[in-house]
Amino acid sequence: MKIAVVGCGALGSYYGAKLCRDNRDVHFLLRSDYDVVRRRGVTIHSKEGDFNARPRCARTPDEIGPCDLVLIGLKTTANDQFAKLLPPLVAAHTAVLTLQNGLGNEESLAKVFSPEQVMGVLALVCLNRTAPGVVQHIDHGHIVLGEFQRWPEPRTHDIATMFRHAGVPCSVTDNLARARWDKLSWNIPFNGLGVASFAGWDAFAGEASPGRPGECLTTDKLLAHPQWSIVVRELMMEVIVAARALGHDLPDSLVETQIQRTLTMGAYKPSTVLDFENGLPLELNTLFLEPLRQAQAAAVATPRLRSLCRVLTLLTDQERKTAL
């Protein structure tokens, strides 16, 4: 199987390196990290054991050509590049699998390719890219694999087996949309509040415009804080209720399940927090605004999510004005 990885940040590099170490034919599409990865490969530091992988490296999709599987690790802010980056990699038989967070990514791919070619993965993992070609694996790593708007196919199970053989715990879901809402119950509070905490409690709980009174809180600090920890749980319940209204049977017990998973991560900074601290665009639409839109369309009250979206939007606008 010939595999292309498009978007070689922490997520794409980690899972691409795992497959490469398992002797798969893996090609990384690279920009700024091209020279480093071509010379030194990809280094993964992990409590499960450090390793180095040597994928094939390319600067353009045409250098790689058609593949059997394309893994998309791009930030969702780059989804408008699908039609430019992906066609040289995709033939009629190619499976296009997005590792991205949030809602609407499969739908965006289905506008460019046949919906039957589109798949999604939920990556339940803590990763940080610490340097060009270097990824720190902090905790977890399980992935959930599903087809876009249809039941699992034989290829679904074949790809799941491939990941397992590469040392990646993998399960198959028969409802990718439900699985996405399940993960949003973690992503929305911890990615969102990690950034919103920078604006301070008053900016989040009240109507004041956010200033710069504090820091972006890591997951452990959010859970230890008397006010933010309550909001973490409230946001999770809003996501769960919205998911149920949309036909996805998420249980109340998911709240404590997610909390327990988070406690093992230590002082973790999710990807949205790192993007904010580095002045990069935030994945506002797919991670926050689209879930809010769908909740509102289902007539679900989500006051905490609405406040979170307001503060994140204001912070993003403030960052944009500062950059200008």
Image (tube, grey):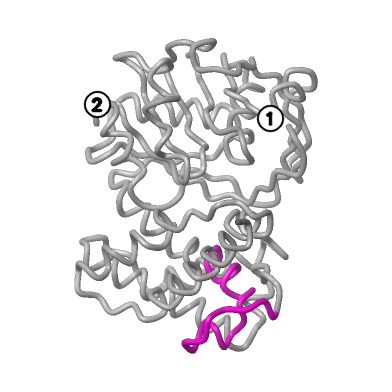
Residue 209 colored in magenta in the image = yes
Q: Nearer the viewer, residue 263 or 118?
A: 118
Residue lying at the far front of the rendered structure? 324
The percent coordinates of residue 295 (x first, y second) are 27, 68
When the figure is inspected, residue 139 is found, relative to residue 39, above or below; the finding is: below
At x 47% / y 10%, what residue is drawn?
A: 65
Between 290 and 154, the one lying in front of the other is 290
**Can you tell which of label 2 and label 1 is closer to the viewer?**
1
Question: Which mark is on residue 32?
Answer: 1
Q: Is residue 205 left or right of residue 22?
A: left
Residue 298 % position (x, y): 20, 68
| Magenta: main secondary structure | helix
Counting other residues with Cα less than 10 Å from the Cα at mark 1, is it few (<14), some (14-19), or many (20 or more)? few
Q: Is residue 230 above or below residue 10?
A: below
Residue 185 within the segment the image draws in magenta: no
Callout 1 amino acid = Ser
Q: Tell me which residue sits at (75%, 43%) in the image.
A: 46
- Read off the magenta span: 190-213
- Residue 256 in picture, x, y percent from top left: 50, 73
Q: Which residue is mark 2?
A: 114
Question: What's the amino acid at mark 2?
Answer: Ser
* Vertical order, 202 against 9 (above or below): below
- Residue 210 image-quadrant placement: bottom right
Point out residue 195 in the picture as x, y percentages from the top left corner.
59, 67
